[in-house]
Image (tube, coloured by chain):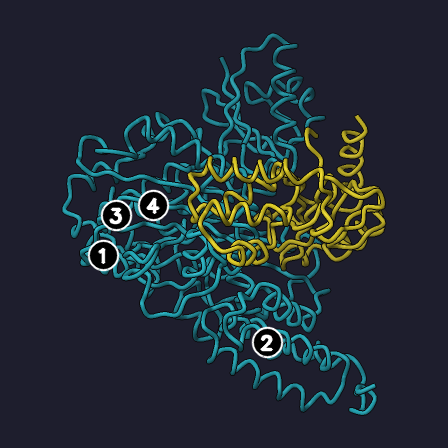
Chain colours: A yellow, B cyan
C-alpha cells in the first residue's frame, strides 16, 4: 500500500481529536486540493469525502474546517454528512477492511456462522480492527451478489460463496500481500 | 481467430472470472492458439459463473462453472471448437434457464461487449433514441404511458404520468435522476444491467431527458457497486465521443449531460427524496411530500426520477412501440420484470419474464429448489421491506395488485428463499433491527419505533408476557405503517407482520416467563 493510515501500535481506534500533529498539515493540504479538484462545489461533498478517505484511509477531524471553508458550508454541515453515511470512517481502520454481508439472502446461506468465524479467525469483533492493525471487519447490508451468498467485499474486490475455508484462503492471501 | 467470452460482471468476478480469463489467455499463448477474449456481461445464470462461452460456427457454446484449474483441461477437450467436457452446457441460447425467459430489457446483456458502442448498435442499441429524436416530446410520453410501464424500483407508479408532470412544467432547468441505489437484499438486476449493458441505461435516460425537457442527469449508484460505477463512467465517455450524449445529440439540437454520483453506504438513499438530498451533497434525510420531486426535485427543479430497470425498459418501448411492450404481462402489470432468484436457491440468477409467472414456478422451474436440498419454508419477495410468503402463497401470480391482496409486494422482483431451518422470529427481529440501523431519523415512528420493535420482539422470543407484547407489536406496526414519512418505516411492518401471521409457532418457542423475571 502506498499510503497507510497512521495507526497506534495496539490497533485501538483513537479518538479523531488525538490525531498526531505531524499528520495534520498533509491531511489538510490534501483535503484542500481535493476540494479544488471538485470545483469547491458543495454538492460534490460525498465525492470529496470518498476521495479523501481513499487517500488517507479515514477522514481526519482536522480536515473538516478546511472542507467546510472551501465549500462555503458550516463545519456542522460537513460533520453531519460525514456521520450520516456508514461508509465514512472518522478514525483509522485496518489495512484491509473486510465487509461481510449480513442481509437476508446471505443470512439464508449462513452468514451468521461466517461472521462468527471471521471474528474468531481475526481475533476481533465486527466493527473493530484486529490488534495487528491489519484487518477491520464491517457488517454491510447487501453487496448485490445475492445468488452467490454469502458475499464479502474487500476493497473493490467482491467474493461469492464464501464459507469458512474460502474466508481463510482470502485472508491468507491478503496477509501475504501485506508482508510483501 | 476464436472469440471466447468471459464475463466481467461482479458476480462472475466474485467466483474467479478474472483468474479464468487470465488462465485462458496464458494457455492460448502456450498452445499457440489465436484467441480473442471478450469480457461480456453476465447471462444471468449466476449458478454457472464463471460461464465461459466460445464462438463456434454453430453459435456460442457454454462451459460452466469454470475454475482456473479447469482451463488446461478445457483446451485438451478442444473447447475452442465446442468439444465435450464435464462443464459443457451446449449452446448458450438453448439452455432451458435462458431459453424459457422473455428478455426485453436484458436482451443484450451477456451477449455484447458492454463497452463496445458498435456492438450495441448492431444489437438494436440506440434505435429507440434515434426514433425519439424525431418524435415530439409529448408523443414519447404518450408512448411510455401506453406501454403500461410502472416504476420498477418497487413502488410501481406509472412512469408515463411522472414524465407527463415534468413535461408540462416550464422551468429554466430540469433534471433526470436515476436511482441505482439498489440496496435491497436479493436484488442485483440494476447492477447486472449497469455492468452488462450500460448504454441501455444511458439511452433510456436520454430519451427521458428529451421527453421531459431536461438537459442534465445524474445516476446515483451505491458505493458497494464499484464495477458498475466504473462501467457507467467509461460508457458515458464513449457515448459522449460518439455524440450519443453531450451537446446536439446526433444533430438533433437536444443536449444532455450525464454524471455518476456515488452513495456512501446508506440504505435510505434508495428512497427517492433521500437520494436527491444525497446527490446535493447532504445528509440523506427524507423530504416531506408534497411537493413531489417531479415538481420540485433535484436542486428544487422538476426532476424525472426512475429506477435503473424503468429507464432501461424505455429504449425498447420507443423502438418497438408501447403496444409491443404492453402485450406482455397480466392485469395492470404490463411488460416484463427481471426476477432475481437469491438466497438459499440451487440455481440462483436473473430471470426476465412477463408478469403473471408465479413464485413457485420461478423457484422450481428455474431455481431448482433450495441450495441446501431441504424444503422451502419461506420466501421474501420485494426486498427487506417485502413480506415473507409461506409455501401456500407461492402460487399467487406476480402482479402488483394480486400481491397487495395477500399483504405482500412484488417490489423490485427479488426473491430470497429460505429453507426449513429458518427462524422466522429472528427474521422479524432483523427487519426491525435493519430499520433501526438504516432509518434516516427524521420521523419518530421509524426512528424510535424500530428500536422499540426490536425490544418487543426480544421479549416475545424470550416468552415474557407474550400475549401483551404481541398486542403491543401489532399496535406498533400500525403506528409505523400509518405514521412514517416514507416506505422505510412504513413498510418495515410488512416483513414483521407476515412472519408473525405466517409462522406464529416460531414466536412461541421459549417457555412463558412471568413479567417480574424479565424486569430483573
Looking at the image, is mark 3 or mark 1 nearer the viewer? 3
**Measured Cα–Cα span from mark 2 to mark 4:** 35 Å
| Residue designated by label 3 | B214
Within 10 Å of disc 2 (Cα), the crowding (few <14, some 14-19, many 20+) is some
Residue B502, above or below B90: below
Q: Secondary structure at mark 1?
A: helix
Q: Position of residue B348 (x, y in %)?
A: 58, 48
**Measured Cα–Cα span from mark 1 to mark 2:** 43 Å
Within 10 Å of disc 1 (Cα), the crowding (few <14, some 14-19, many 20+) is some
- Chain letter for the residue marked with disc 1 in the picture: B
Is B215 on the left-hand or right-hand side of B222? left
Looking at the image, is mark 1 or mark 2 nearer the viewer? 2
The answer to whether the residue labelled 4 contacts the one labelled 3, judged by CB atoms less than 8 Å apart, is yes
Q: Earlier in the sequence, mark 3 or mark 1?
A: 1
Q: Earlier in the sequence, mark 1 or mark 2?
A: 1
Q: Secondary structure at mark 3?
A: loop
For the C terminus of chain A, which image quadrant? top right
Which residue occupies 47% across, 67% down?
Answer: B409
Amino acid at each position: 500500500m502506498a499510503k497507510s493510515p497512521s495507526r497506534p501500535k495496539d490497533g485501538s481506534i483513537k479518538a479523531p481529536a488525538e490525531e498526531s500533529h505531524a499528520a495534520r498539515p498533509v491531511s489538510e493540504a490534501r483535503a484542500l486540493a481535493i476540494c479544488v479538484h471538485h470545483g469547491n462545489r458543495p454538492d460534490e461533498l460525498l465525492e470529496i469525502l470518498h476521495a479523501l478517505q481513499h487517500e488517507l484511509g479515514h477522514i481526519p477531524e482536522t480536515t473538516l474546517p478546511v472542507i467546510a471553508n472551501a465549500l462555503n458550508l458550516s463545519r456542522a454541515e460537513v460533520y453531519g454528512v460525514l456521520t450520516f453515511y456508514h461508509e465514512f470512517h472518522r478514525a483509522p481502520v485496518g489495512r484491509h477492511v473486510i465487509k461481510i454481508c449480513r442481509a437476508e439472502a446471505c443470512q439464508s446461506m449462513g452468514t451468521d456462522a461466517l461472521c462468527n468465524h471471521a471474528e474468531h479467525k481475526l481475533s476481533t469483533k465486527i466493527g473493530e480492527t484486529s490488534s495487528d492493525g491489519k484487518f477491520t471487519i464491517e457488517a454491510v447490508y447487501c453487496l448485490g451478489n445475492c445468488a452467490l451468498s454469502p458475499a464479502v467485499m474487500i476493497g473493490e474486490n467482491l467474493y461469492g460463496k464464501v464459507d469458512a475455508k474460502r474466508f481463510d484462503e482470502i485472508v491468507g492471501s491478503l496477509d501475504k500481500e501485506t508482508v510483501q | 481467430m476464436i472469440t471466447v467470452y468471459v464475463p466481467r460482471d461482479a458476480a462472475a468476478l466474485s467466483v474467479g472470472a478474472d483468474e479464468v480469463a487470465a488462465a485462458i489467455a496464458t494457455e492460448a499463448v502456450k498452445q499457440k492458439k489465436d484467441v480473442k477474449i471478450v469480457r461480456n456481461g453476465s447471462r444471468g445464470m449466476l449458478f454457472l459463473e464463471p460461464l465461459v462461452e466460445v464462438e463456434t460456427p454453430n453459435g456460442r457454446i457454454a462451459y460452466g462453472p469454470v475454475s482456473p484449474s479447469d482451463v488446461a483441461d478445457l483446451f485438451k477437450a478442444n473447447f475452442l471448437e465446442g468439444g465435450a467436457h464435464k462443464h459443457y452446457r451446449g449452446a448458450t441460447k438453448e439452455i432451458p434457464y435462458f431459453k424459457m425467459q422473455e428478455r426485453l430489457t436484458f436482451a443484450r446483456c451477456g451477449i455484447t461487449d458492454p463497452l463496445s458502442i458498435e456492438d450495441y448498435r448492431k444489437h438494436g442499441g440506440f434505435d429507440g433514441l434515434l426514433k425519439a429524436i424525431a418524435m415530439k416530446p409529448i408523443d414519447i410520453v404518450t408512448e411510455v404511458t401506453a406501454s403500461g410501464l410502472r416504476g420498477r424500483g418497487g413502488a410501481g407508479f406509472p412512469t408515463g404520468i411522472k414524465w407527463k408532470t415534468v413535461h408540462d412544467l416550464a422551468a429554466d432547468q430540469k433534471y433526470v435522476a436515476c436511482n441505482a441505489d439498489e440496496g435491497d437484499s436479493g436484488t442485483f438486476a440494476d447492477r447486472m444491467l449497469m455492468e452488462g449493458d450500460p448504454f441501455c441505461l444511458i439511452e433510456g435516460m436520454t430519451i427521458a431527458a428529451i421527453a421531459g425537457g431536461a438537459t442534465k442527469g445524474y445516476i446515483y449508484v451505491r458505493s458497494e457497486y464499484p464495477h458498475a460505477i466504473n462501467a457507467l463512467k467509461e460508457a458515458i465517455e464513449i457515448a459522449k465521443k460518439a455524440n450519443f450524449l453531450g451537446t446536439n445529440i446526433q444533430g438533433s439540437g437536444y443536449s444532455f449531460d450525464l454524471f455518476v454520483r456515488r452513495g456512501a453506504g446508506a440504505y435510505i438513499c434508495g428512497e427517492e427524496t433521500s437520494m436527491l438530498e444525497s446527490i446535493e451533497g447532504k445528509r440523506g434525510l427524507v423530504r416531506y411530500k408534497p411537493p413531489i420531486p417531479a415538481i420540485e426535485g433535484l436542486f428544487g427543479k422538476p426532476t424525472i426520477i426512475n429506477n435503473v430497470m424503468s429507464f432501461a425498459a424505455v429504449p425498447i418501448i420507443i423502438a418497438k412501440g408501447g403496444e409491443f411492450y404492453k402485450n406482455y404481462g397480466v392485469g395492470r402489470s404490463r411488460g416484463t420484470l427481471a426476477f432475481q432468484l437469491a438466497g438459499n436457491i440451487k440455481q440462483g440468477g436473473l430471470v426476465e419474464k412477463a408478469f403473471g409467472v408465479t413464485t413457485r414456478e420461478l423457484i422450481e422451474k428455474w431455481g431448482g429448489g433450495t441450495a441446501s436440498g431441504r424444503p422451502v419454508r419461506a420466501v421474501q419477495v420485494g426486498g427487506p421491506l417485502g413480506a415473507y410468503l409461506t409455501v401456500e402463497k407461492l402460487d399467487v401470480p406476480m402482479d402488483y395488485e394480486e400481491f397487495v391482496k395477500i399483504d405482500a409486494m412484488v417490489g423490485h422482483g427479488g426473491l430470497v428463499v429460505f429453507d426449513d431451518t429458518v427462524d422466522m422470529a429472528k427474521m422479524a427481529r432483523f427487519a426491525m433491527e435493519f430499520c433501526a440501523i438504516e432509518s434516516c431519523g427524521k420521523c419518530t415512528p421509524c426512528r424510535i419505533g424500530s428500536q422499540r420493535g426490536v425490544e418487543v420482539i426480544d421479549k416475545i422470543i424470550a416468552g415474557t408476557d407474550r400475549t401483551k407484547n404481541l398486542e403491543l407489536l401489532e399496535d406498533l406496526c400500525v403506528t409505523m405503517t400509518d405514521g412514517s414519512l416514507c416506505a422505510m418505516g412504513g413498510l418495515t411492518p410488512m416483513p414483521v407482520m407476515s412472519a408473525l401471521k405466517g409462522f406464529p409457532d416460531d414466536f412461541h418457542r421459549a417457555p412463558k416467563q412471568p413479567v417480574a423475571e424479565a424486569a430483573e
